[in-house]
Image: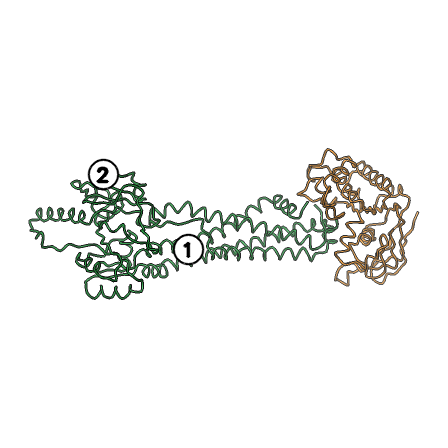
Amino acid sequence: MISLHGVSLRLGGGNRAAAVQFSLSRFEVAEGEAVALTGPSGCGKSTLLNLIAGLRRADEGRVEVDGVDLASLSSERLDRFRGGHCGMVHQTFHLLGPFTAVENVAVGLRFGARRRRGNRARAEEVLDRVGLGDRLGARPHELSVGERQRVAIARALAGDAPLLLADEPTGSLDPETGREVFALLRRVAQEDGRTFLMVTHDLALAAELPRTFDCSGLVRSSGDVQEPAGATS
Amino acid sequence: MSLLAMALRYLRFRWLVTLLTVAGVALGAALVCAVLTLRHESERALSRDAGLFDLVAGGKGSPLQLVLSSVYHLDAPTGNVPYSEYERIRRDRRVRWAAPFGLGDNYEGFRIVGTERHFFELPDRAGEPFFHFERGRAFEDRFEVVLGSRVAAATGLDVGSTFFGTHGLVNVPGGEVHRDFPYTVTGVLESTGTAQDRAIFGTLASVWEIHETEDRLHSAIQGTALLGGQKEREATSVLMRLETPGLRLLMADEIRERSDGIAAVPINEILRFQRGVIGPVQRSLLAIAAAVVAVACLTVLTTLHQAGERRRRDVAILRNLGAVRLEVAALVFIEGVLLTGTGILLGLLLGHGGLALGSATVREATGLVLDPWHVTRPELLAVLAMALCGSLASLLPAITSYRRTPIADLQLTD
């Protein structure tokens, strides 16, 4: 499902002095697998997730998702590919302020699944599945943080993307809500047979997934060359 | 949800900024539309009045004043011409139609114009009668009068009504009322959309009779003798339609040479007046309006730019969801077009609506009948230019959104 080989990427913009290098020799995830990406802050967990989502392009190496080499796609095709293949959940929810919960999900369907009809009905169905069937017309500022994250999860699920990517999905939530959200993510990924990758600092949550990938050492300053850990359990 | 619906939602979300921006554009557009329409309509109305007559002869003075007093019933007359001059003009075979005007009195500010019965046979440019009676008939005897449509509407006078004229051309408190000479209304004219709607037409003989009586009275009081019968009858002016407009200047020269008075071509005087006096004022107003539009377009640009800065995160989210560059750029562009389009449409309504409200006042003050809802070609071009400016102002933030990469902006928090 996911395959990265010999990937390197210079980070830090145009400032060479501040530039750091992301390097990853090999990373593979099978279809339907659930993987926790762990490691200290700045180690490259989110960068890895963004490479898989096509939000960043590798300078070197090969990133394949669902058999497609992302480097071969134009900017437009990459955006469409991401919309169709990746459902993403972020730490800060990334909901659109002017739109209601159901509209946020429907907008995701419009651009992701490229569906013209039935988006609202599908959005209502998915929101009902994540327990927000009675909060369809609420705007983000009217929802609790836990509810906001559920809307974001519903949006990631609505288009039936085979890949569910979550970047610190519990990072903004209190422990109890965080566990509920994690349980929800894991349950829906399992039920739908989606491939699930989750960046997290919470080792206890990571331990609940069948596989953990330690991202420590993926990002190094120039000249500091060493093989990344990439340990699995 | 369509891009249009999304753009509308974003505009509604920032309703105050949206309202202020639309108001700015609308104000500029309203000014442009009002000035252009006013210019066109005033030119059209002035030309329509001036075009009724080929030539006006009157006493020595300003040709413009002669035209304003005789054709528009506005200014004071220049002086008198001998009635014999009118008779000579009427006998001229090159003159298709001529009528004398004698001024001196008013009723509630509406001028009482002494003329002759054939005044109502004035032909329009197609050769058909220009005047039509809404009710009643033309005057036949002294002290019978016909009302212009505006006079009838404003005074409530109708066929059979009687009234007294007041000395002078304007209504002033305490004016001398000619109580010995009651007028009787015999007819009301249909509206012509010209200054003639604001006049009361009676016989020239009535005007002479009132003022000769007054003169005799004044002479008796002052102890001087009036040589009745020896004084030559006069008219304030003579209005003419010629067999062909090409004779205007030639005949004007002839009248000037053989009499003490002047002759003016109304359309020439009005065009000179428009170009010399009204034109610069209108051009200044137009320049101000253009500046307002330019500021409004800059406001749209600033608003969209600031909105774009605030919306960097939203644009990144949409890209993250699968929207392509062109779609997010189109969303921003549609927002700009909606802002400017709504502003321009509102401006059109405001501009023309304002004119519609003001046209009654203009009509009462000058007799000019404006069509406030008439959209002129220059106005259409101005609207297109404004729409183009608005589109350009919307394009810049759209291009900025197109060129952004989502990854950096996704780090921004709510």
The residue indicated by pointer 2 is: B162
What is the secondary structure assignment of the residue under circle 2? Answer: strand
- Callout 2 touching callout 1 (CB < 8 Å): no
Q: Report the chain holding disc 2.
A: B
| Same-subunit check for callouts 2 and 1 | yes
Residue A207's image quarter? top right
Eye-nearest disc, 2 or 1 = 2
Q: Which mark is residue B40?
A: 1
Label 1 amino acid? His
Label 2 amino acid? Thr
What is the secondary structure assignment of the residue under circle 1? Answer: helix
Q: Is residue B252 above or below residue B289?
A: below
The green one among the chains is B
Residue B298 appears at what percent x and percent y?
55, 55
Q: Report the chain holding disc 1.
A: B
Residue B146 appears at what percent x and percent y?
26, 44
N-terminal label among 2 and 1: 1
The orange one among the chains is A
Given residues B245 and B254, the one toward you in this image is B245
Image point (22%, 50%), residue name: B116
Image point (89%, 59%), residue name: A226
